[in-house]
Amino acid sequence: MNLRSGINPVMEALRAGASLDRILIAKGAGGARIQAIVDAARQAGVPVRFEPREALDRMTKNSVHQGVVAYGAAQGYAGLDTVAGAEMLVLLDGIEDPHNLGAIARSAHAAGAGAVVIPERRAVGVTDVVQKAAAGALEYLPISRVKNLAQAMESLKSEGYWIYGLDERGETPYHQVEWGRRNAIVLGAEGHGLHRLVSERCDLLIGIPMAGAVASLNVSVAAGIVLFDWRRKQMEAARAGIPRGTEAAPPA
């Protein structure tokens, strides 16, 4: 059973038609946003119960739930073969902070990426904290979980993907990248970066030039910068009438 907590995650689950068994509202909670959830739940046929706030605190282990908790089917993971074909995939190498995974998923969806790919081991999976940080994006953005990220990269290459590793050692600035028709960005955990086997399988290592004294950015911020640069160039190509797939090929 999957738990969602917070106004935005629960509302987006209703909007997306997610399979919800019930929604719990804290007694005394009110306001237009709470009422919108109650109305949407009734329209969708999802039972709504009003419970003491302390009960919701126990269910969410005292995390910030804003007076709203929903129970539904467990979060499913998409197969890599079902997401291969998207113009942009975001691959995560050892991201263990659930807030970072949620924030990256939110940026990835906003920028138009097709999915986020995570490994099974030494990485966080989809949890209530991740869903809350994603602010509803996981209702629309598939998450694929693979046994071995390096092997998944080889599989994507066989499907025509160019894979870019975002790393502080990358000598090519992100804004100089000529994106291909199918692209994947790989991001590593803060403090560790990309693992060697993952780094070696990237077609190109790219970096974000830094003006300040701090050597690196939070990984979710870095993801947003690069993803929206890809989005900008994609929109510019569309305005210029450049057909998809005919832009300059990425460097080998």
Image (cartoon, rainbow, N blue to C red):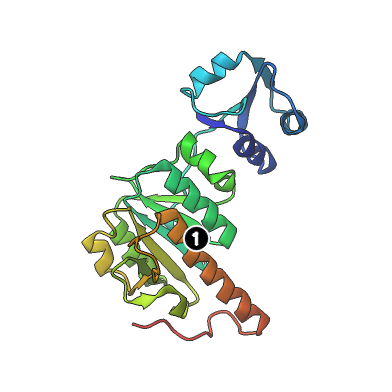
Q: How many marks?
A: 1
Q: Residue at x 55, y 15 (%)?
A: 55
Mark 1 lies on residue:
224
Is residue 23 shown left or right of residue 245? right
Q: Quadrant of residue 51?
A: top right
Q: Is residue 147 above or below residue 197?
A: above
Is residue 218 shown left or right of residue 62? left
Q: Is residue 128 visible?
A: yes
Type of amino acid under label 1: Gly
Which residue is nearer to you in this view: 84 or 174? 174
Q: Position of residue 67 (x, y in %)?
A: 62, 25
- Which residue is most to the front? 213
Q: Residues within 10 Å of mark 1 (few under 14, many from 20)?
A: some
Q: Quadrant of residue 208?
A: bottom left
Q: Position of residue 28 (x, y in %)?
A: 70, 17
The C terminus sits in image quarter: bottom left
